[in-house]
Amino acid sequence: MKKIEENIFYRIYVIYLARDYPAKFVSSLYIAFIYIFLFAPVYGLCVDLIHGVDKLIIKFLYAFYFLLILIRIFIKYYNKVILTNVFKENKNKKIIFPNWCYFLILPLSMIFGIGLYILLSQSIMQKFNLEGYLYNL
């Protein structure tokens, strides 16, 4: 998974660098949003288990989730050693997919993450009446 992430980062970086955008920032955001949507089912189910607490706490938990992923990705890709290693490893690799395929990854991760959350929420949480289970203990 790490190599795939770094390859996506590098390809998005090169595409945005050619268009004079802040490539490192945009590529880091792209990877962060992929992770946010891919981990949404797991995190959403955990938040559903504590359903019943104050809405402010739930909003805080979602903000913490977003910030945790964003900080992790930005710390990783703003480290010069890691960034040079990513460039060194991916610079000589042959481009397998066209550029438009790399931009399909984010919408596909949105569809997969949110769709899986809805599916798990309806088939597990509602079927077994687990919503707010930890709160009711």
Image (tube, rainbow, N blue to C red):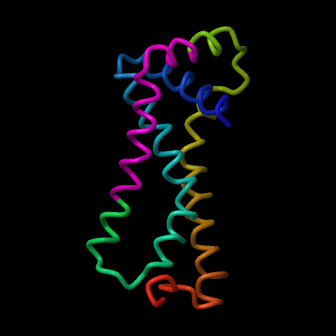
Describe residue 23's horizontal placement relative to residue 41 as left or right.
Answer: left
- Residue 25: say if magenta: no
Instruction: Report which quarter residue 78 is drawn in.
Output: top left
- Residue at 70% from the left image edge and 14% from the top image edge: 93
Magenta-colored span: 63-86
In this rendering, the answer to whether 111 lies above or below 129 is: above
Describe residue 14's horizontal placement relative to residue 90 as left or right.
Answer: left
In this rendering, the answer to whether 98 lies above or below 50 is: above
Instruction: Report which quarter residue 55 is drawn in.
Output: bottom left
Q: Viewer-proximal residue, 133 or 59?
A: 133
- Residue at 44% from the left image edge and 45% from the top image edge: 69
- Residue 85: say if magenta: yes
Of helix, strand and loop, which mostly describes the magenta segment? helix
- Residue at 44% from the left image edge and 38% from the top image edge: 72
Describe residue 134's horizontal placement relative to residue 89 as left or right.
Answer: left
Q: Viewer-proximal residue, 32 or 107?
A: 32
Q: Position of residue 20 (x, y in %)?
A: 36, 16
